Amino acid sequence: MSDTPHPPKGSGPLARREARLAWGLLAPTVISVSLVVILPLLTIFWISFKPIGLADLRAPTLRVNEQLRDADEAEPYIRYRVRNTSQDIALTSASFRDAIPQGVRLGALPEQCTFEQQVLACDLGEVEAGGRSELRVPILTSDAGAVEDVLEDSAPLVRVKAPNILTNLDFTLENFARVFDGGEFWQVLWVTLAYTIFGTIGALVMGLFAAMLLNKSFRGQGILRGLYLFPYVAPVIAVAFTWVTLFDPFSGSANALLIQMGVSEGAINFFGDRPLALIMVIMFEIWRYFPLSFLFILARMQSIDTDMYEAADMDGASPFQKFWYLSMPQLLGILSVLFLLRFIWTFNKFDDIFLLTGGNAGTRTLTVNVYEQAFAISNIGAGAAVAVVIFGCLLLFSLFFFRFMSREEGL
């Protein structure tokens, strides 16, 4: 038997203490990420399987409106108008309590009401969906003004039990069936993919060309770089309004210039005709977001060792050969990361398209569909179902990217 000592199995006390310390330091970050990202995502998944409309987000309750009325040739009375705010859900154990001023006596009460210690309590039991009722409580006092002042300063305390559609366990696949019903979804999906792919690739290519132009030092380089960043830093509302005004078919400068040059015989509705509207939206996406690619690519270009280019010049390499065989291998990493980020951001883009076309003329994407389902049609469940589809598409793209593309590019 050998006397050689063997290393201890498992982790020692110091390693366990370091692990606890590490988890303790990471706990605030993990909790913050869970609250900001994971919980809303789980909420969207939950809502996507429930038949929820926009009106269902407000829980049903009992609305009680009290007024002091003076009946003709009779004693004054307090009128309580009771209404169930929901047209679909019945309320159970409905009741309300109202404070009555000291010294004020009440007359014959409705059978569901009691009056003790200057507190009027009315038990209404079950109130059907959309149900309305009225209760009258006579006042046996001549000082009706005092009662009116108290009624204006206080409101009845309402208690009610009602099922909450957000928290119950009733689930349905109707939202997803509505999303995938017919050929509309696939058309919207293809528009989204075309907008995302061409917008992403166009922004990268244009950013690459801009970086190549400004990769050398010359007078006014800083000013030109600032001008290149203008589309990205300018407010999206301002630049979208500028584009819509510039290409307006009636008063736009672009149409006037094309007509004067003889290129077009009449006005062109750039943001209203298919497929021109989608092309214009893609061009806006490329123009607005190429500065981000330009910044990252230029920073990577300026970190490449110039000795390689000097050796290539001595060997007689052409500018294209230097770019393709020297620059591109060095830029593949940053281009890959930019493609991933820009693809995800463009796929989720909503404000650009909505401000330019409102999703009309063949520019309706999945994100615009979320808005239309949730707010235009008031179907929150269907909107959440489309959002889940968007998450699934981006998850599949991310898995494909990290499984194949990033491996080929050495990331």
Image (tube, rainbow, N blue to C red):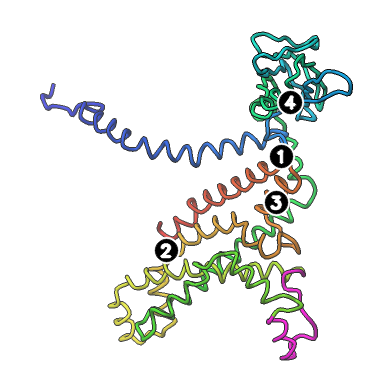
Which comes before the other along the chain, label 4 or label 1? 1
In the rendering, at what x and y percent does residue 281 appear? 65, 67
- Foreground label between 1 and 3: 1
| Distance in Å between CA atoms under marks 1 and 2 | 43 Å
Q: Which residue is mark 4?
A: 64
Image vertical order of residue 403 relative to residue 54, above or below: below
Which comes before the other along the chain, label 2 or label 4? 4
- Foreground label between 1 and 2: 1
Q: Which residue is mark 2?
A: 334
Q: Report helix, strand or loop for mark 4.
A: strand
Q: Is residue 256 magenta?
A: yes
What secondary structure is the stretch in magenta mostly built from?
Answer: loop
User: Callout 2 environment at 10 Å: few (<14), some (14 to 19), or many (20+)?
Assistant: some
| Distance in Å between CA atoms under marks 4 and 1 | 23 Å
In the rendering, at what x and y percent does residue 208 appear? 47, 73
Q: Quadrant of residue 94?
A: top right
For image coordinates 64% across by 26% down, the residue present is 154
User: Callout 3 environment at 10 Å: few (<14), some (14 to 19), or many (20+)?
Assistant: many
Residue 54: mark in rendering = 1
The amino acid type, in three-letter code, at marker 2 is Ile
Magenta extent: 253-273
Image vertical order of residue 362 relative to residue 94, above or below: below
The amino acid type, in three-letter code, at marker 4 is Val
For image coordinates 68% across by 34% down, the residue present is 58
Q: Report helix, strand or loop for mark 1.
A: helix
Q: Quadrant of residue 16?
A: top left
- Foreground label between 2 and 4: 4
Q: Report helix, strand or loop for mark 2.
A: helix
- Foreground label between 4 and 1: 4
Q: Are marks 1 and 3 in contact (CB under 8 Å)?
A: no
Residue farthest along the left direction in this orientation? 3
